[in-house]
Amino acid sequence: MNNAKMWLVVQPTVGIPLFLAGVAVASFAVHLAIVTNTTWVSGFLSGTDMAAAPASAQIEHAAYTY
């Protein structure tokens, strides 16, 4: 273990839940930022149909896949 002496200062029963809570808060903050700052996520989550791409864009995309 790289930081084995850390557990001499912080008990594992305190440190591990704090670490997991920090990960959960960071994950929630990232997801909240994505949902509030984009326009397509709410439509995707509600199941609405998205507008189809123009045919020229699909042809250009197909040309670059090979």
Image: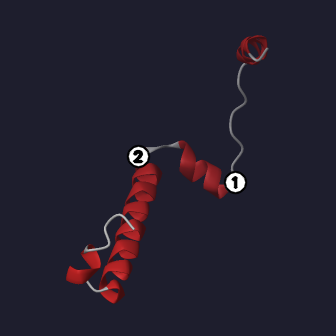
Using the numbered discs, state the Cα–Cα distance from disc 1 to disc 2 in whole angstroms. 19 Å
Is 18 situated above or below 65? below
Name the residue nearer the viewer: 37 or 8.
8
Q: Earlier in the sequence, mark 1 or mark 2?
A: 2
Q: Please state which of the two labelled residues, at mark 1 or mark 2, is closer to the viewer.
A: 2
Quarter of the image with the C terminus is top right
Quick check: 66 above or below 22? above
The residue shown at (46%, 44%) is: 38
Q: Which residue is mark 2?
A: 37
On the rendered image, what quadrant is the N terminus found in? bottom left
Rendered location of residue 3, percent (x, y): 31, 67
- Badge 2: how crowded within 10 Å, few (<14), some, or many (20+)? few
Question: Mark 2 falls on what kind of element?
Answer: helix
Residue bearing the label numbered 1: 47
> Which of 30/53 is in front?
30
Residue 4: image quadrant is bottom left
Labels 1 and 2 touching (C-beta < 8 A): no
Image-based side of 18 in relation to 30, left or right:
left
Numbered mark located on residue 65 in the image? none
Q: Is residue 43 left or right of residue 4?
A: right
Taking the image as shown, residue 58 lies to the left or right of residue 43, namely: right
Residue 53 vertical placement versus 48 (above, below): above
Q: Amino acid at mark 2?
A: Asn
Q: How many marks?
A: 2
Which residue is depicted at the point 46% across and 57% down? 31
